[in-house]
Image: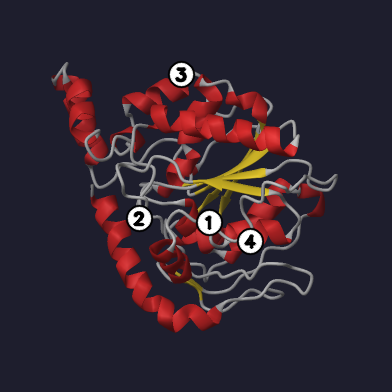
């Protein structure tokens, strides 16, 4: 699919940009342990050199939750991503605010550690289920909070709805959510026509896409996968959801597919908070406004004003937000 080429092209460009942008890292507060960068390129460079590594601040299995932050945070990356290249910003940001942070790379194929999230989400949800159980056992916590990006806003729904994971999740923060699927340049329409006129379409689709990206057709609006998810309910009771969208999302079409009206859902469009934020689908994971939205969602009692700095699609923040 075009999304695969888009991500690969951005990664190549980002590796070049990383040389120029490496000096633009923003340090956390004096008491913080990890530097935080609001740029896409350093994350790609880190993944290129250490694709199986953890992002800064993540996967300290000796970490124990505190009364201030009693639930560990599990980060779930997007399609074609890894924990290293998707969470290079949000992971240290969370750790610097006192959270126990854990991240996994799920769904890599063969011997290629650079791209995750490829198999059908019914399969990768099993990996998330095992990982969450490991986090709960290691930390002694009763529940986790989830932060997902892109596919990471869809696959965990299967874990929660079909694998009994809902009772393990308290807050779920979704960056560029895909509640209603994506039209993706007409691909969803083609899929629906196939469903309508070819009874064998579902099995043929699986045979074709499972060879390289079983998750891809599942993300399209009206897919059989999303129909099954929606039939179980959308915003589940007992879970608090926060949707963070960008109107410049080129992969979730329309971007309002990330909007869900429900009593336990808060919907945020970044441009209503910051008019100079031009984050696209990928850059939201490195966006300082989205980062504060995430922190506020996880700890609403101590919510802080969101920063507003210029953010460029495919690049990141032009300069660090005030205070770091």
Residue closer to the observer: 273 or 160: 160
Q: Which residue is depicted at the point 18% across and 32% down?
A: 208
- The residue pinned by badge 1 equals 87
The picture places residue 3, in percent across and down from the top left corner, at 29, 51
Disc 3: which residue: 231
Name the residue at 51% across, 58% down.
Answer: 285
Q: Residues within 10 Å of mark 4 (few under 14, many from 20)?
A: many
Crowd rating for badge 2 (residues with CA inside 10 Å; few <14, some 14–19, many 20+): some
Q: Position of residue 310 (x, y in %)?
A: 53, 74
Query: Is 68 in front, or is 58?
Result: 58
Labels 4 and 1: the sequence-earlier one: 1
The residue pinned by badge 4 equals: 92
Q: Position of residue 147 (x, y in %)?
A: 58, 45
Q: CA distance from mark 1 to mark 2?
A: 20 Å
Q: Secondary structure at mark 2?
A: loop
User: Of tags 1 and 2, which is closer to the observer?
Assistant: 1
Query: Nearer the N terminus, badge 3 or badge 4?
Result: 4
Is 296 positioned to the left or the right of 216 in the image?
A: right
Task: Name the front one of labels 3 and 4.
Answer: 4
Q: Kindly report the distance in space between the C-alpha atoms of the residues bearing marks 4 and 1.
A: 8 Å
Q: Is 254 on the left-hand or right-hand side of 318? A: left
Q: Is residue 163 above or below residue 174?
A: above
Q: Are marks 4 and 1 in contact (CB under 8 Å)?
A: no
Q: Which of the 4 image quarters holds residue 322?
A: bottom right
* Relative horizontal placement of residue 152, taking residue 33 as reference (left or right): left
């Amino acid at each position: 699919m075009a999304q695969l080429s888009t991500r690969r092209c951005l990664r190549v460009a980002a590796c070049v940009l990383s040389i120029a942008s490496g000096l633009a890292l923003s340090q956390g507060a004096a008491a913080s342990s990890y530097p935080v960068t609001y740029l896409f390129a350093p994350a790609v460079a880190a993944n290129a050199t250490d694709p199986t590594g953890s992002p800064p601040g993540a996967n300290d299995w000796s970490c124990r939750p505190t009364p201030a932050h009693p639930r560990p945070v599990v980060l779930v990356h997007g399609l074609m991503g890894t924990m290293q290249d998707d969470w290079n910003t949000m992971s240290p940001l969370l750790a610097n605010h006192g959270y126990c942070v854990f991240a996994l790379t799920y769904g890599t194929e063969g011997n290629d550690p650079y791209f995750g999230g490829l198999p059908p989400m019914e399969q990768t949800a099993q990996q998330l289920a095992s990982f969450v159980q490991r986090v709960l056992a290691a930390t002694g916590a009763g529940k986790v909070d989830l932060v997902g990006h892109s596919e990471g806003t869809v696959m965990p729904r299967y874990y929660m709805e079909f694998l009994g994971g809902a009772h393990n999740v308290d807050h779920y923060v979704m960056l560029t959510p895909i509640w209603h699927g994506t039209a993706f340049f007409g691909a969803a329409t083609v899929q629906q026509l196939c469903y309508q006129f070819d009874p064998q379409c579902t099995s043929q689709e699986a045979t074709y896409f499972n060879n390289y990206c079983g998750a891809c057709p599942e993300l399209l609006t009206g897919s059989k996968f999303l129909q099954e998810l929606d039939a179980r309910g959308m915003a589940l009771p007992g879970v608090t959801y926060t949707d963070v969208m960008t109107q410049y999302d080129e992969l979730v079409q329309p971007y309002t597919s990330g909007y869900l009206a429900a009593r336990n859902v808060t919907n945020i469009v970044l441009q209503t908070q910051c008019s100079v934020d031009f984050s696209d689908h990928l850059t939201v994971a490195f966006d300082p406004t989205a980062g504060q939205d995430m922190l506020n969602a996880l700890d609403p009692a101590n919510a802080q004003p969101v920063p507003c700095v210029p953010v460029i699609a495919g690049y990141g923040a032009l300069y660090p937000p005030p205070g770091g």
